[in-house]
Amino acid sequence: MKSYRKELWFEIPSRRGFVNITPDVNTCLRESGVKEGLVLVNAMHITASVFINDDESGLHRDYDRWLEKLAPHEPVSSYDHNRTGEDNADAHMKRQIMGREVVVAISGGKLDFGPWEQIFYGEFDGRRRKRALVKIIGE
């Protein structure tokens, strides 16, 4: 069985943002040489997410508004976590909602997606370098 590991690095200039990382994961898949197996992609920071959905800008704006309603950034004083000197309690909660990782089947050397599915990196406390792990195993 083959095993492949790579870190994808991001520096989102705003507090929140979504990046389609499907092309990066496809590059990793080609580099791995795996034709049948699984790919795991996970955010390696507790204020970021990896998820699968449609690459449609309206949906991304909807996500941003929805998440901000569920866990608003301000007032930062409303969160116990922020009493530690941080201001990112909302980002932890947004990550919990959007998820840590995705696993996608690899069939015939390709990501075995349903219609419209793409992989995204979601940032909820940006303006600094963060990473996601791509781990591929298979034959």
Image: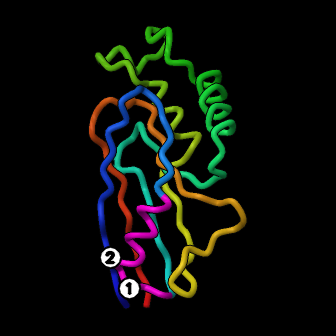
Left or right? Give the position of 64 relative to 12.
right
CA gap between label 2 and label 1 equals: 9 Å
At a point 50% along the width and 18% down the height, the residue shown is 73
Q: Main secondary structure of the magenta part?
A: helix
Q: Are marks 2 and 1 in contact (CB under 8 Å)?
A: yes
Residue marked by disc 1 = 33
Residue marked by disc 2 = 4
| Magenta span of residues | 22-35
Q: Camera-side residue: 6 or 42? A: 6
Name the spot of residue 107 as percent of width and height, x first.
57, 84
Q: Say which label, 2 or 1, has the lower sequence index.
A: 2
Name the spot of residue 40 as percent of width and height, x first.
46, 66
Q: Camera-side residue: 46 or 130? A: 130
At a point 34% along the width and 77% down the height, the residue shown is 31
Report the amino acid beneath label 1.
Gly
84 up-or-down from 123: above or below: above
Give residue 15's mark.
none
Q: Camera-side residue: 101 or 106? A: 106
